[in-house]
Image (cartoon, helix red, strand yellow):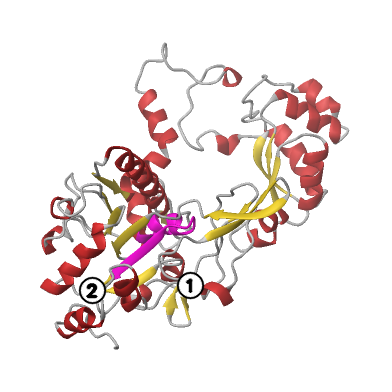
Amino acid sequence: MAFGAAERVTTTFRGMPTSRPAPLAGLRIVEVSMLGPGALTTHLADLGAEVIKVEPPQGDYGRRMTWPIVEGVSLLFLHVSRGKQSITIDLRTDEGREAFMDLVKDADAVVEGMRPGGLSRRGLGYEQLREVNPKLVWVTISGYGMTGPYRDMPSHGIAYDVWAGIVEPKVNDDGFAYMPEHASIGIHAGPMYGALGLLAGVLRARATGEGCMLEIAQSDAAAAFDWLRSETWKAYERPQSEVTGNESDNFERRAPGTAGMEQGVRYQFYETNDGYVLFMASEREFWKNFCEGVDRPDLFERWPGSQYADHARGNVELRGILRDIFAARSTTDWIEFGMQHNTPIAPANTPKTLPDDPQFQDRLPWIPASRLGADMLPTPLKFIDETLPVPTKAPTAGEHTETVLREVLGWDDSQIAKARDSGAFGKMEP
């Protein structure tokens, strides 16, 4: 397929196979990023957007950073840069800046994935680029954003979750604080919010002819993603007469997060004979279904609980009974029980065991290493009766430089040779 062509996807219409452009075919984005923030355009490339990654002559150092390293390239880079084209440009040169300007003329958006101001210092900021493309949507994504006392602070992805109160330090037996295993939020939520903002900006720009500048901080995204806990703490600053707890807790105000959940009984982890499950019968209907399903209606009769959100918190006697009940069956048995008796029970997976889960296997088939250099998950977005394009492998540094110059910018041999000789692209093979 020629670079820049609108990739098509297989679809069905009234039972007949057909094809149509990928959902974001025709969207062109110029990206200048390092490390994780480049995931902003990964989401869009997965849906067919044309993403041109502009790298310095030595390439994005993210190729060599973070483990695991798969055949010499980091998994992070392989994932974040899949489906993209790479052109190397030395933005320190006049010819390199001119080439960048040329790329931007017909682009829908530019993404700057680094500390804000990196491109402005090269004379390629939003104000300069909008002169050649008034409809341009400019997105800058960074750790702490463009404002605030932390705006210039160097940082890595874990910092944003720690800052947002999502990951807290643990202390080992020797008294040393350490970082516990955790899910990363900011480095994933930031690009997702950024992709949403970019699409919103492009839709408006195409309708009005006017572009815009927007910014996203990964720290902001982490806090926004975990909004319930922080907003609950804020709500509890108000008096008891205005903000209470649930009816099931006699309206007692519990601290946010898992405070109180540790003593939960009807909403709790239980060990099976081969693993763990999460039991979630906090509604009275589900609790009754469970008790009848295990032939223990006496449990419901004795502790019917409130209609909604009743965790039977602190009921140690009931917790012991449930512990013994769950220990008698396998995890698979309990999942089947939950479906048969309309009771919410979930398997407690780990990142290692998750791929063996039948729901995972049905919904998230691996894109194989033979295609992308490492086994990767597909986008979770599913367009009904369509098969989205399979991403291409992350490019080598400058792999598409000449292709982009010829097919996107329309440069001829003499223009390419002149720019190459000036050092605009670093060391580029003829």
Q: Is residue 421 above or below residue 267?
A: below
Can residue 144 be seen at all in this image of the molecule? yes
Name the N-terminal-most of marks 1 and 2.
2
Provide the residue designation for mark 2: 89
| Residue 61: % across, % down | 31, 74
Residues in magenta, as a range: 38-54
Q: Residue at x 14, y 82 (%)?
A: 422
**Quadrant housing residue 409:** bottom left
**Quadrant housing residue 103:** bottom left
Can residue 177 be seen at all in this image of the molecule? no
- 116 with respect to 179 (left or right): left
Provide the residue designation for mark 1: 393
| Residue 430: % across, % down | 29, 88
Which amino acid, by three-letter code, is at mark 2?
Ile
Q: Is residue 92 magenta?
A: no
Q: Is residue 66 above or below residue 256?
A: below
Mark 1, other Cα within 10 Å: few <14 / some 14–19 / many ≥20:
some
Mark 2, other Cα within 10 Å: few <14 / some 14–19 / many ≥20:
many
| Residue 2: % across, % down | 44, 71
Q: In this view, does 102 lie above or below 15?
A: below
Q: Which residue is drawn at 55% across and 64% down?
A: 390
Given residues 56 and 423, the one toward you in this image is 423
Q: Are marks 1 and 2 in contact (CB under 8 Å)?
A: no
Q: Which residue is drawn at 43% across and 68% down?
A: 76
Q: Which residue is drawn at 47% across and 55% down?
A: 182
